[in-house]
Amino acid sequence: MDASRALLGVYVPARSVWHRLGVGWKYVVFLGLAIPAVASRSVWLSLGLLALSLLLAASTRAPLRVAWGLPWGLVAMFAAIAGFHALTGEWRLGLTLVSTMLVALYGSRLLLITTPIPVLVDALVRATTPLCRFGFDPERFALAVAIMVRSIPFVAASFGDVRDAARARGLERNPLALVAPVVVQTVAFARQTGDALAARGLGEG
């Protein structure tokens, strides 16, 4: 599975109820999962919301490797967070933190698996248009979200490619060999994105 699918998920055409549901209602469901998970300190509520988000992600009819799959790097990070809190005697807090992050991740997949990115961006523009009277620019905000969604999988893919290359050279334990190339590729990606936006007159103001 590529990094884009493994991390955030990508649009998968299907005929599920989520594909037919209006994008506004999908955002409401996402917020209904994420806000209680972030606001609550209850490990049991967090775990319950995680179970619910997994069920909802599976109901998109996307392959389970897309709906549920996680990159190994992310699994290791979550394991490290949970393990650290367990060692310090705060295992409930560790489970709550990991569960909350997973709820947000799987909740976002409900949007990204069942809705094309342009539709999500258009919905953000419509929802934030009333803020124009306060000087808010809905199109720039939606563009920033779209770039973020595109950039996160790119960085994840870069790290995976660099890690594989470092392993082939026996440098997988060298932090500099892992981090430096990712930083260079990320900066190059950011410059290319900025140049493309400037060429379209979107990088000014």
Image (tube, rainbow, N blue to C red):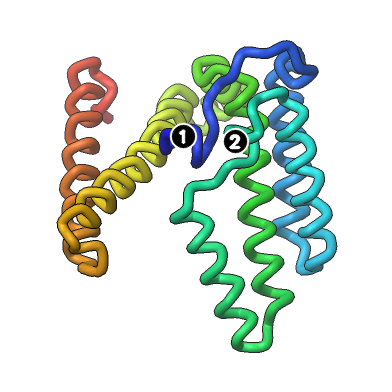
Q: Which residue is mark 2?
A: 65
Q: Which mark is residue 161?
A: none
Q: Is residue 104 left or right of residue 141?
A: right
Relative image position of residue 8 (x, y in whole percent): 52, 37
Residue drawn at the location 17% of the way across and 57% of the way down: 180
Q: Quadrant of residue 154?
A: top left
Q: Residue furthest bottom?
A: 88
Q: Is residue 59 above or below residue 99?
A: above
Between the C-alphas of marks 1 and 2, the distance is: 8 Å
Kind of residue indicated by mark 1: Met
Inspect this view and state whether residue 168 appears.
yes
Q: Secondary structure at mark 1?
A: loop
Instruction: Tell me which amino acid carries mark 2.
Output: Arg
Q: Total label count?
A: 2
Query: Residue 45 location, x and y as percent?
Result: 83, 60
User: Residue 37, located in which quarter of the rendered image?
Assistant: bottom right
Q: Are marks 1 and 2 in contact (CB under 8 Å)?
A: yes
Residue underneath mark 1:
1
